[in-house]
Image (cartoon, rainbow, N blue to C red):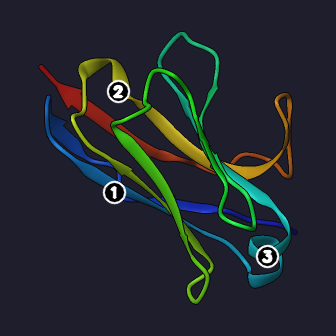
Amino acid sequence: QVQFVESGGDLVQAGGSLRLSCATSRITFSINAIGWYRQAPGEQRELVARITSDGTTNYADSVKGRFTISRDNAKNTVYLQMNSLKPEDTAVYYCNGYISPTLVATSWGQGTQVTVSS
């Protein structure tokens, strides 16, 4: 079964930075676009950024210029570098295979909590 394991979340002050990691299997990593998603309390899960197998990236307007998604092919890992964090970035962050705006590759993992204090 396809699995994604997220890590790197923490409590940080506004204006700070964090780097999240998303590890998966070699096969999954090579054939899928992978997205970072987040879900704040009481809100729907939203796509934050995605990266295709050839390295093309897309971002939500709310994080453009602050977040950077990247991939390490040797480690089968996708990263989300988050800079200039804001309290509204507080959420549980998940990664998954991106298939379409409404479809992901597998069930959701536990995610990693990011909390930004003001």
Alpha carbon distance from label 1 to label 3:
22 Å
Q: Which class describes the residues within 10 Å of circle 2: few (<14), some (14-19), or many (20+)? A: many
Specify the label residue 90 is tagged with.
2
Q: Give the SS element for disc 2.
A: loop
Q: Is residue 43 above or below residue 45?
A: above
* Marked residue nearer the N-terminal end (1 or 3): 1
Q: Residue furthest bottom?
A: 74
Residue 30 disc label:
3
Secondary structure, mark 3, is: helix
Q: Residue at x 39, y 42 (%)?
A: 67
Using the image, tell me which numbered label, if any, was put on residue 19: 1
Q: Are marks 2 and 1 in contact (CB under 8 Å)?
A: no
Left/right of residue 6 with respect to residue 2 in the rendered view: left
Q: Residues within 10 Å of mark 3 (few under 14, many from 20)?
A: some
The first of marks 3 and 2 along the sequence is 3
Kind of residue at badge 3: Ser
Corner quadrant of residue 33? bottom right
Give the mark, 2 or 1, whose residue is nearer the N terminus: 1
Image point 33% across, 37% down: which residue? 66
